[in-house]
Image (spheres, rainbow, N blue to C red):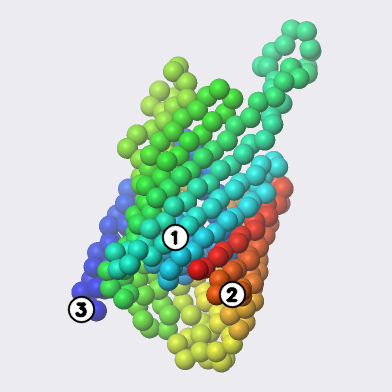
Amino acid sequence: MKKLNFVSFFSIFILFSVGSGLATGFNKGGRTSFQFVKIGIGARQVAMGEACIAVVRDVNSVFWNPANITGISNIQASFTYTRWLADMDYLAGAVGYRWRKIGLLALSIASLDYGDIPEALAYHPLSGNDTRTGESFTGNDLMIGLTFAREFTDRLSIGVSAKYLKEKLFVYDESILVFEVGTFYNTGFKGVRFGMGAQNFAGRSVSWLEVSDRQEGYDIPLLFKVGIALDMIAGQDGVFNLGEDHQFQLSFDAVNSNDYGERYHLGGEYWFNQIFALRGGYRFNYEEGNLSAGFGLQSQISGVGFQIDYAYVNYQYLDTPHRFSLLFTF
């Protein structure tokens, strides 16, 4: 049975690899829309350099690898706030529920608010160089998702998601339905785990204008991810044993998309006594936001577990975004 499980997982791995190769052959840099779907949600995941699809298994996994919500034991809810670039606010929430022996269900929502944007004309005959009208407009992005995941064995989990995406700017808006799939496999040896995910499958492109310089429309960012995680320090089960109070896991993700070349994420997380966590990570082949760091605190009150996480991502030329997450386990 274990051999069959591994063969099944390896077959899925081959399918993802082939899909990733196809995406590479159609690189469309600057030709995709709905870029907000690539903004990381979850302070824990982001602090680890977004190297998380094989390691983090909380409800925020709906935004990374739907298979990983099988780490939820009963009910879990999360809220994430991100102070994004240009003073934009990004809010996200998710709730997951273990439905008896059928599987895991999760609902998620995320919204990016552009704030007030000063209106300006391309040309104003009476204002000279200042073409601002004194008016303002706004815009926002919206994502609503439904996720289902199931443990097919004690080591293999598979999850799928359907997400409704909408972008609006001024009087123009566009929406689309996308699908995602992910897998998680625990080898049972030294905490070695594998994760894979494909995000934002869409059957069409989108366009906002009836007459455009790009008649074929704009694609949705299609992402293929493969990740591996290892328990470096985890008592008897880790590579090194420093006692049960110390745990450290290392993770690595490779990401391929239809609008950029390959990117790589490396991250680590250290827990002391399952109370306090330190995290760090680095993203390779990015112009900005390479280095990340953060921390977390978790405890329990009246049978309800809670976790507070913070993530910092270093930006050199743009304002540094800060993320805060709250996670509740019932």
The kind of residue on which mark 3 rests is Met
The kind of residue on which mark 1 rests is Gly
In the picture, the quarter occupied by the N terminus is bottom left
Residue at disc 1, secondary structure: strand
Identify which residue, 273 or 98, lies in the foreground: 98
Dot 3: few (<14), some (14–19), or many (≥20) neighbours within 10 Å?
few
Q: CA distance from mark 2 to mark 1?
A: 20 Å
Instruction: Check disc 1 and report the residue beneath it.
Output: 96
Q: Quadrant of residue 245?
A: bottom right
Circle on res. 1: 3
Q: Quadrant of residue 122?
A: top right
Which residue is painted at 50% across and 68% down in the image? Answer: 330
Q: CA distance from mark 3 to mark 1?
A: 29 Å
Q: CA distance from mark 3 to mark 2?
A: 41 Å
Instruction: Check disc 2 and report the residue beneath it.
Output: 302
| Residue 326 as seen in the image, left or right of residue 129 | left
| Residue 162 as seen in the image, left or right of residue 33 | left
